[in-house]
Image (tube, helix red, strand yellow):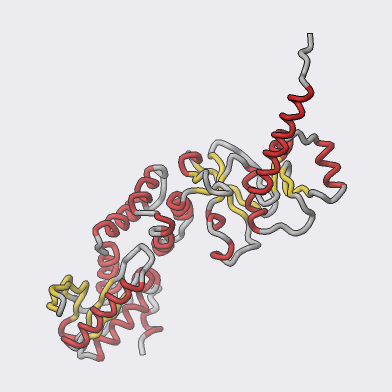
Amino acid sequence: MTALVDPELAARDLEARRAWVARELELQDGVASRAQLTFGGYTPNDVRRAIRRREMQAVHRGVYVTHTGPLTWPQRAWAAVLYAEPAALCGPSVLEPQRTGEAEAPIHVAIEHARRLDPPPGVVIHRVVGLSRQTFAAARPPRLKLEDNALLQARGATSEIDVIGLLTDTIGRRGVTTDAVRAALKRHPRLPRRAFIRDLLSDADAGTCSVLEHAYLARVERAHGLPAGTRQSQRLTPTGKEFRDVEYEAYGLVVELDGRLNHESWRAQGRDADRDLDDLALGGRATARLRWHQVFSTSCRTAARIAQILKANGWKGDPIPCGEGCDLSTWES
């Protein structure tokens, strides 16, 4: 026997479902999936009729938007996530387009590793292990947590400086801490350069720059035959004892290695300027302040410039090429 359905209850239920769809459309910038529309009581005929009337257009298979014009970036992002759901924005798409300058770039989404899904035009799909643990589900649209997203991008990095850049862009943004990145690292057991990333995080926690200091010693100073500088030389200043990363005392040069991973503040820049001014005023020493880029990306150019300063101040030696592809001579004058 077929159960009788109370028409009034059915009407109220449909009204509630339609109201839910209306709220979702508002939250999702006018984009909805077929599953959402079906839950709201819209039949395939209803959808086809809306498309014919130009009230709606299909974006991807099973994803629609409630207009027929060009899509905004948020609408493209919602459409990609709903097409691949459960999914989350990832890679460059985690940032708003005004931050990346790539409003027309493909939308990157992450899905669970075990799934297989063909991406539609304009969508790039990444497969990750443990998607739910890496997702910030409260975001609209859902996205990977910033720390997990940085590590996802680090997987495809071609150099250590790219990894450093990703961490620098992430730590300090929206409350991301080194502890958060370290916890995320456990969710990426096969990540390349894990030891390097752990060392960077340890340096950041300790307020030191040992990774950068060692790289300067190996890539710049020793590799190019520069004189050996004194490490962590002590200096008395009006504010007390301070230490300089590398000092070439005989040649009046101090090299400071700035390996901070978080975003610089004007206060930090001010303290650096004070230190540089103290060195110049109290000891007549110039300060060369180097960052990751100068040591990892342009080490040969950096060595040439340091050598020029040293020679101008009395060094009688000459720098040497670090290897076959060294462009030291390009920067010498």
Q: Residue at x 62, y 54 (%)?
A: 107
Work out which residue is located at the far top of the displayed protein and give it. 1
Q: Is residue 283 left or right of residue 48?
A: left
Q: Quadrant of residue 229?
A: bottom left
Q: Is residue 293 left or right of residue 227?
A: right
Q: Is residue 112 left or right of residue 222?
A: right
Q: Residue at x 24, y 85 (%)?
A: 286
Q: Quadrant of residue 238?
A: bottom left
Q: Position of residue 221 (x, y in %)?
A: 26, 74
Q: Position of residue 54 (x, y in %)?
A: 84, 51
Q: Is residue 186 left or right of residue 123?
A: left
263 and 129: which one is in front?
Answer: 263
Q: Position of residue 142 (x, y in %)?
A: 55, 46
Image quarter where the C terminus lies is bottom left
Is 156 above or below relative to 216? above
Q: Residue at x 20, y 83 (%)?
A: 279
